[in-house]
Each structure stands twice: as C-alpha cells, then as structure tokens.
Image (spheres, rainbow, N blue to C red):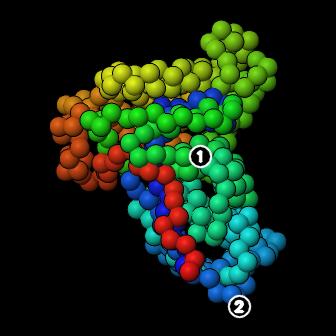
Amino acid sequence: MPIARAPGRVTLIGDHTDYNQGLSLPMAIDLATTATFTPKPDSFLVGIESDQVLEPYEIPLAGLAQGHAVPGSAAVAPPHTLLAAGLISLAGPTSGGTLTVTSTVPVGAGLSSSAAFSVALLLALGQTLNPVEMAVLCQKAEAMAGAHVGLLDPLAIMGAQEGHALSIDFATLRTRQVPVPPHAAFVIVHSGASRELGTSEYGARRAECERAANQIGRPLGLCDLSDLSSVTDPVLRRRARHVVTECTRVRQAEHLLGRGNLAAVGALMTEGHRSLAGDYKVSTSTVDELVDHLIRTPGVLGARMTGGGFGGCVIALCEPDSPALDPAQHAPLRCWQVSPSRGAELLARSQ
C-alpha cells in the first residue's frame, strides 16, 4: 500500500518568472498532502476519497469519456476530477484501487494545493521520475484539466530540502539549494479571498508576456532593463519590467541569505510585492492592505503575496520574537507559522 507525501510551497522571490524562463526562489513548507493507494487487481476504476472534496468519485483507468462526464452522471466533471483523471492517465497504474487523500494545504490560498495533490498522487501510483520529469508530468495533467501553468510549483515541491530554499533557473531547469538562516521566521496569512487561476487573469498575463518577448526577440527572463526600450506598448513594458526586476531580486536574495542579512531580504520581498501589484497587476486591494498591515507590525522584515495572485495568501519574513507569529494577531484570518520543509517523498511502498 504506497503512501506518499508532498508539501505545499511559498515563493520568497520570483513569481510569474517560471513561464518566462526566469529565476525563482521558492521553499517547501510544513503543510502537506498525503495520498495512500490501495490497489484492487480486479478493478478498472480508481476511486478517490479526499478530505477537501465533499463526495468521493471514480476515474476509469482508460480515462474520462469525451465530454468529461463523471462515471454514472451526466454532469461535466469539475476541475479536480479532470486533474485526477489526467494524473491517472499519465501515471498508468496497472490496476484500479482506492486513493485516500488528506491534506493540510488550504485550497485556493496560493500555496500549491493542486501541485501537492498532483505530486502525491503520482508518487503513490508508482512514478519514480526525477524532479524535472515529475514537474513536466504535473504540468501536462494540469493542461489536460484546462489549467496552463508553469513548472514552479511541482519542481519546488519535488526538489526541496529541509532548511533550504530552492533556486530555480527556468531557462536551464537547473536548481540549487540555498540555506535559510535558522533564525528566519515565516508566517503565512490568508487574505480571506480565495483564488482560482482558471477564472483569474493569469492566462492574460502569460499572453502579455509572450507578446512582449516577441517584440524583444527573446524570453523576458533572459532580458535586462535596457531591452525593454523595444516594447512600445506601455502595459506590456510594465509586465516585462516586473519579470526582469524580479529575476534581479532573486539573485540579490540568494546573496543576502548567504550573508544572513534577513532585513535586506525582507525589503526585497516587499519590493517584489509592489512590483506584482503595480507592474504586473496580479494583487488585490485586500492583499495589498494585508501586506501593509504586516510590514507595520513590529519584527516583520518584509511581506508579499505568494502564488499566482488574485487573492490567496501573504507571506511575511519575521524576527523570531515578532508578534506577527502569534495566530491571535490575525484573527479571524487563518494563518500558519511555517519553516523550510523537506520535499515530496514516498513514505511506504507496496508490500
């Protein structure tokens, strides 16, 4: 009975850079999804029971029928069912069975609940690919469910090491472990606004970046500020400016973490949020107000939205004695104190 665990993730610096062949610095967190697969050799269905979905559902090994109808129902399958179907199709289990999924990663918070679900299922279903190959498989499953996402989330989840952030160069897919000083304290606060990439302007931002890159002649993650003069549309220029300056912030943050300069890292986090809100326009007034509130709190060194934006969570870098680490300070909003976690793993194998 294989059991797999996959953590959620936050981005310290480097949002909306992955699909631009840029740089990012995420870290896995100690909120996680666990998937347990109980094979049934005579079954051609995979039943999924999840504590984040009200009703269990079944996926045929052959995949969903045309029109994406849920077996036994005329209804069109919801996104989580389509994602599960894509994962099962790509994983190719030899028999059906039951997948039991539990998770402490909140849905719609920008903490990679979907990628944690995907990685945990693939591991439980027997996939043994390297981190990059696993991330590509997750990306394919997301596309089959109608979500065109980058590689950041699954790659961060697969490649993480405890006590480290993961530096990712999306032009080469090379990664490097970046130690996080042990006295760095992090709190994640939910803004109260749920987010869904499929219903947000995420796709529009990707298209705007592609248009800007076409005008320049190369991916935005490989550009510098001098390249932006060839982008004539002011909106596209602002989108490109975020990507270029965000990649610079990633490089600076890696250097500053190595020197233990957390105050400067916090300032970069806040600067990155201003860029995401102003140049990239993926924040909301609620998230902006939460960031402002956090950076006014004693002991908070910096704060920013995390994930694709349009709602979700804010992460704050704090001194160890900051009152921002106390959950009572944020009530009624949900919050989690987190630390850099180990990556995804298979906890138990088939007997």
Give the residue type that dot 2 points to: Asp
User: Residue 40 appears in which quarter of the rendering?
Assistant: bottom right
Query: What crowding class fits label 2: few (fewer than 14 Cα within 10 Å), some (14-19), or many (20 or more)?
Result: few
Element class at badge 2: loop
Residue neighbourhood size for the residue with mark 1, other residues' Cα within 10 Å, grouped as few (<14), some (14–19), many (≥20): many
Tell me which residue sits at (44%, 65%) in the image: 103
Do callouts 2 and 1 mark residues in contact (Cβ within 8 Å)? no
* x then y, percent, for residue 250: 50, 26
Image quadrant in which you'd find residue 257: top left
Q: Is residue 78 visible?
A: no
Residue for badge 1: 155
Q: Residue furthest right?
A: 66
Which residue is the site of mark 2? 42
Q: Residue 183 versus residue 143: which sits nearer the camera? A: 183
Q: Residue at x 29, y 28 (%)?
A: 301
Query: Quadrant where the C terminus lies?
Result: bottom right
